[in-house]
Each structure stands twice: as structure tokens, then as C-alpha cells.
Amino acid sequence: MMRKICTFLLTLCACLLTACGGTGEATGRVVAMDVRDGEGLVSFTVETEKGEQIALELTEGTHIFSFIEGLDEDRFREGELTDTAVWAEYNRAGRTVKAENGEKTRIYPAEHLEICGILSPETVSLDRETAANIWQYYNCKVYTLPDGTPLLKVKNPIGPENVSVGGTENFHGLEIEAQEKILEYYQSRGLLYDERAQLERAYRAWQETEGEGFVEYSLGQEISPSASSPRLIYFLTAVTLPIDGNYIYELCTCAAFDKSTGDYVDNSELFSCPREELAERLLDLADIRDEQLRQEMEQAFEPENLVFYSDFVELHFPAGTLPSQEHSWRVILEYDKGLENIMQHWAVPLKSE
């Protein structure tokens, strides 16, 4: 009986030791740093989004890395990067340290440390008394109030390079000359949103709610291949715009390029009918019979809002362009339902594989 009890106690002790070990994770902003002469950064404290504070220490074996372009990880170890956001994986088998005031703190050795974000030295004035800080992350930047409240997240623009869609020709499959011309087109066109205006909208919304229940706004732009024909390649530009912090909408446009040369081809030139008749012909195919809605669509129609996919075309009417409609409106037209009869044969996209 005694042997069974001893065996049980040994097993229990082993379980307790295992529970105290293992690894944990912490994500948040660095709120305190212990930097010493000749040693650099010794330890630091991370405050998570839940308000918890976790003390971590650097060791010779701590692996520090970052995906933020141009960031020098060694500067963090030296204690020079004072305003950062990090993700850390640490060993739960920490130790207790005693501060000069007698308070005890549990501190854990960091095994892996990613520097996720860094505070920019630049600020943006919102009014006479308030300026927004800018936190730069590897895939976005976030405008925050001085107390850290996020107002607007702006995702890094994506495409047309380094974006692939299954079953569709992509940018890197083109000749270098064509790639350069397409890049020149998009660089010249720039972003299709007003970042400053959206930041001001977010700030006004925060003021109106006095911060109660406020959710940060989101903004982004992505360019990706959507279809290709024997002669052309099509790129979709999807702009994500905030309605408020909880809801967004997309502004979609499409551009066609000659695959051999990279020359831009206006969407109206992809059809055999005159430009001035194009809206009417498309709405006939879509069987839009509501007179008021049809009239609004004819007036709001823009060829660049035709988005070409391998099996169909979407005609986009952004929110606010159709007076009778509260939200954006999309019309789907299939090539084999009469659409290809009014398109140039060299413009009709190849079927997806």
C-alpha cells in the first residue's frame, strides 16, 4: 500500500513540474525596459490587449527577428528601440526576482521574440490639441490616439506583383517589358482612397461616441489577376473602405493589358458596339426592367467598373452611385448568355482550368 502511495505522489509531482514548465506566448506593447551599461537590454515588460503584464528577460539563446523592412533587430537587444510591439514565446519555468522596493515579480526567459511593430517618430495632427501616433507593422500601419486607442488600420497595398490566383495567368508570367509597363500604369494611378480623409472620419466617430464602443476603421487596396484571354490579361483592383468600424465595402475596378507589350486597353474597346451604347446593351443582357433603376445605372455606368473573370463579368455600381439603392450593387453577366456576342473575340477570357 505504501508503495502505491509513493508511486502516486511521484506521479503527481511529475505532473506539477510539467505544468510549471512548457512554453507560453505574449503579444502586446513593451511598456518597461531594463537597460544596463555594457549589457544592453536585460529584461522588459509586455502589456497584452487584456491589460496583463508579463516580464520577460533576454538570454544569449533568445532568437530575435522581425518582418518589418529595414528594422535592425540588434538595436532592440541593445535597448535602443523603446517603443515597440512584440510577440514572444517564453519558457514558463521562470524565476522570481525582488525589486528594490521589496516587490516580487515573476520573470520568464524569452525563447523567440518577433518585433511586430514600431512607433514612427512622425505624428499626424487631428486638431489643435490632438495628434495621432503611427505604429508601423510588417503588413500595415495603425493610427492611434496618444493613449494607444487605435483609430485607423491601413493595410499595405498588394499587387500586381507577387500575387497569384489559381488557374489564372499572373504578373510574373509576362515578359519583363510588359511587367514594367503595367507597374508604371499602377504607380502612376496611385491609391484609390484618401487616407487622410478616412483618418479624420475615424476620429470624428471616436469623438461622437466618446470612445464608448468605438471600433477602429480599416482601409486597404489589393490588385490581383482576375482573367486572361489569348491577347489580354485582366487585373482586379479591390479597395476596402470603411462604412464604420464594424462594416466595410469594396470598390472594385478592372483594367486590361496587352500580354505582349503591357499596353493598357480601355474596357470600352473590348466590345464591338459603340461606347455610348455599351451600358444599354449590357443592361439588356442583364434583363434590368425597373425603369428608375435602369436609368440610374445608365447614368452611373463606367467601363472600368466592369470586372472580368474567366466565366463571367461583374458590373459594379459603388455605394452612392445609384440614388435608389443604399448599398453597392452588382450585376453578373455570363459570356455564353449573349455577352461574348458583343465582345471582341480576342478579349473573351479563357475558361478557368
Image (cartoon, rainbow, N blue to C red):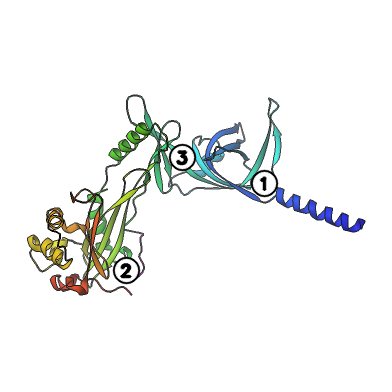
Magenta highlight on residue 163: yes
In the displayed structure, would residue 138 be above or below residue 29?
below
Label 2 residue SS: loop
Residue 319 position in % (x across, y down): 24, 50
Name the one closer to the observer, 322 or 199: 322
Q: Quadrant of residue 142?
A: top left
Residue under pointer 3? 118
The mark closer to the camera, 2 or 3, is 2
Of the two numbered discs 3 and 1 on the same chain, state the one appearing first in sequence: 1
The disc labelled 3 sits on which kind of residue?
Ile
* Residue located at (71% from left, 27% from top): 102
Label 3 residue SS: strand
Q: Are marks 1 and 2 in contact (CB under 8 Å)?
A: no
Marks 1 and 2, how far apart at CA:
47 Å
In the displayed structure, would residue 97 be above or below residue 254?
above
Q: Which mark is residue 169?
A: none
Residue 336 position in % (x across, y down): 21, 75
* 10 Å crowding of disc 3: few (<14), some (14-19), many (20+): many
Looking at the rendering, the stretch of residues picked out in magenta corresponds to 161-167
Q: Which mark is residue 168?
A: 2
The disc labelled 1 sits on which kind of residue?
Arg
Residue 328 position in % (x across, y down): 25, 53
The disc labelled 2 sits on which kind of residue?
Thr
Marks 3 and 1, how far apart at CA:
26 Å
* Residue located at (14% from left, 71% from top): 344
Q: Are marks 3 and 1 in contact (CB under 8 Å)?
A: no
Please indicate whether residue 81 sits to the left or right of residue 255 in the image. Answer: right
Marks 2 and 3, how far apart at CA:
37 Å
